Image (cartoon, grey):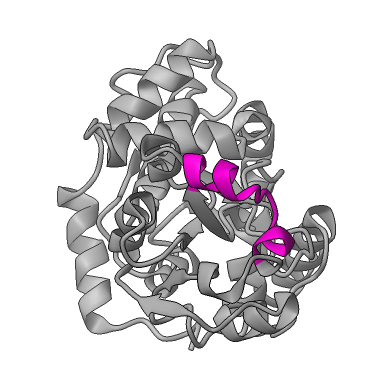
Amino acid sequence: MKKTWSALALVAASGLALTGCSGGGAASGSQGDELEGLTGVIGAKDFAEQYVLAYITTELFNAHGADVEANIELVGSTNVRQALENDQFLGYWEYTGTGWITYLGETEPVQGAEEQYQAVAEADLDENGIAWLEPAPLNNTYAFAALTETAEELGVTTLSDVAALPEDQQTFCIESEFSTRDDGWPGLRDTYGFADNTAMLDTGVIYTATAAGDDCTFGEVFETDGRIPGLGLTVLEDDLEFFPNYQGSFTLKQTTLDEYPAIADVIGLVAPLLTTEVMQQLNSQVDVEGEDPQDVAIDWLTEQGLI
């Protein structure tokens, strides 16, 4: 599976390397020259958070002497990973849970964010020569949220609180993939003892439906999604730690890191700042306010004094 690279995706990646890239480094302020000579394409998956992360990386690398550009046009996690393995992408931000389950074929997540990162970093380096740099604190994991006013009225802050509600108040909006995943609804329902009151909706619709309370009280969300603050939702604590950790980490080939070890130092400047709350705000600027992800990245890096 992970070695599959469709002809269509190959054409898309090759063509978009020319048509879907940022103008590398146009807005970056000089912060050093330790990445001088580094060229290539920073990849991204096809959603706002990945776009922002790709542009943050591109602008930051160029501020340190590189000449790289972003490609935000490729669709699908597997295609993006293959672009890295085939040297079409210099690197991209991946999530620890995705790496562990999707690329390494593991079925059971490792409990604890640090433990999950160490496990995926060691295994991916040993098996595939892929390096995972210092992870960001952000955790783009599955979660359930409710309208803040509703959560306060019901007195729920954790998923165990939800399970203690009367069954007719336990209503959930989920999307089709989540309904069958190993780390999705069946396991979550059994872990907490939820009532099986679900409405199946498209991912994007779940956020607005949860805010409106039309189809459900509790909606499946991704924890760093910008629509959470934008729609006034509150994420409920997964107090039994059912969901895997999905910390973001910049991934690249170890051979590239060996040639340019300063990449780790430069990523180390930005990774600790990328918390779940910061990503929610940056994602909200793109998904809710309609701003350009490259502009969002440049403005944030400038505010942090990094470019």
Q: Quadrant of residue 194?
A: bottom right
Q: Nearer the viewer, residue 167 or 304?
A: 167
Residue at 59% over, 59% down: 141
Residue at 41% over, 28% down: 59
> Where's residue 305, x and y in %?
53, 10
Left or right: where does residue 33 sit relative to residue 121? left
Q: Nearer the viewer, residue 103 or 238?
A: 238
Residue stretch rendered in magenta on the structure = 147-162
Left or right: where does residue 156 sit relative to residue 168? right
User: Can the viewer see residue 210?
Assistant: yes
Q: Quadrant of residue 6?
A: bottom left
Q: Nearer the viewer, residue 251 or 301?
A: 301
Q: Quadrant of residue 198?
A: bottom left
Left or right: where does residue 18 sit relative to residue 68? left
Residue at 29% over, 25% down: 295
Q: Nearer the viewer, residue 116 or 54?
A: 116
Q: Main secondary structure of the magenta part?
A: helix
